[in-house]
Image (cartoon, rainbow, N blue to C red):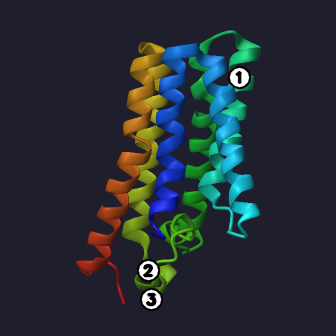
């Protein structure tokens, strides 16, 4: 159950957004999805639960995307704040790697995985490289999508390289750790 809430916080707004986009248009979808995300944050807070990074990032991303569309008049600008965010996160990952810190420890802190906490951060270079390559792929897909794809095709590409691919990269990270690719 402790893993279900963060996963739902990632997936529900994405699916809600697409249904609303098809039914009511881009701005209505952004406003309603942002309200849903903010409601989720308020609900967690009212129940005395910790507000996860994924909840906050989701709400901020939707609001930034809405602003990009309003100011540009182009629905594809929806992806520009996410592109900027990916570039910043990749830079942060490079900084963590140079500082001998673990990208996975940082990304997984909402999940509280005891086995991960046993692995020293400074030994996570192979996993850090995996995450950096993943974010390079996310950045390239957004840039190429902005240039060559329509909104809907790009939405599904970004979605697939978002939450589902993140889960795959987490699993690959666990495999690297379990196979002894991380020095003890």
Q: CA distance from mark 1 to mark 3?
A: 42 Å
Look at the numbered disc 1 and give the secondary structure of its residue. Answer: helix
Residue situated in front as seen by the camera: 51 or 90: 51
Residue, disc 1: 68
Percent position of residue 113, x then y: 46, 78
Q: Is residue 41 left or right of residue 170?
A: right
Mark 1: give few (<14), some (14-19) or many (20+) Cα within 10 Å: some
Mark 2: give few (<14), some (14-19) or many (20+) Cα within 10 Å: some
Quadrant where the C terminus sits is bottom left
Look at the numbered disc 3 and give the secondary structure of its residue. Answer: loop
Residue, disc 2: 116
Q: Are marks 3 and 2 in contact (CB under 8 Å)?
A: yes
Mark 3: give few (<14), some (14-19) or many (20+) Cα within 10 Å: few
Q: Residue at x 56, y 43 (%)?
A: 86
Residue, disc 3: 118
Percent position of residue 91, x then y: 60, 52
Q: CA distance from mark 2 to mark 1?
A: 38 Å
Percent position of residue 3, x then y: 45, 66
Q: Are marks 1 and 3 in contact (CB under 8 Å)?
A: no
The residue positioned farthest toward the top in the image shown: 73
Quarter of the image holding residue 84? Answer: top right
Percent position of residue 25, x then y: 58, 14
As drawn, 41 above or below 178: above
Q: Residue at x 58, y 66 (%)?
A: 96
Q: Is residue 148 left or right of residue 32?
A: left
Q: Residue at x 68, y 36 (%)?
A: 34
Q: Is residue 48 left or right of residue 119?
A: right
Q: Residue at x 48, y 70 (%)?
A: 2
Closer to the chain start, of discs 2 and 1, is: 1
Residue situated in front as seen by the camera: 96 or 28: 28
Quadrant where the N terminus sits is bottom left
Q: CA distance from mark 3 to mark 2?
A: 5 Å
């Amino acid at each position: 159950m402790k893993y279900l809430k963060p996963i739902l916080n990632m997936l529900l707004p994405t699916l809600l957004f697409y249904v609303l986009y098809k039914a009511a248009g881009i701005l209505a979808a952004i406003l309603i999805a942002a309200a849903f995300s903010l409601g989720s944050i308020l609900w967690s807070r009212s129940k005395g639960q910790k507000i996860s990074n994924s909840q906050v990032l989701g709400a901020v991303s939707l609001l930034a995307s809405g602003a990009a569309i309003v100011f540009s008049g182009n629905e594809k600008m929806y992806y520009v704040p996410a592109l900027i965010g990916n570039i910043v996160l990749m830079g942060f990952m490079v900084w963590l790697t140079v500082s001998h810190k673990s990208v996975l420890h940082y990304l997984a802190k909402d999940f509280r995985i005891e086995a991960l906490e046993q692995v020293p951060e400074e030994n996570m270079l192979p996993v850090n490289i995996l995450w950096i390559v993943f974010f390079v792929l996310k950045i390239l897909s957004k840039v190429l999508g902005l240039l060559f794809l329509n909104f809907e095709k790009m939405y599904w590409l970004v979605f697939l390289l978002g939450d589902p691919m993140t889960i795959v990269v987490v699993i690959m990270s666990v495999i690297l750790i379990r196979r002894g690719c991380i020095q003890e």
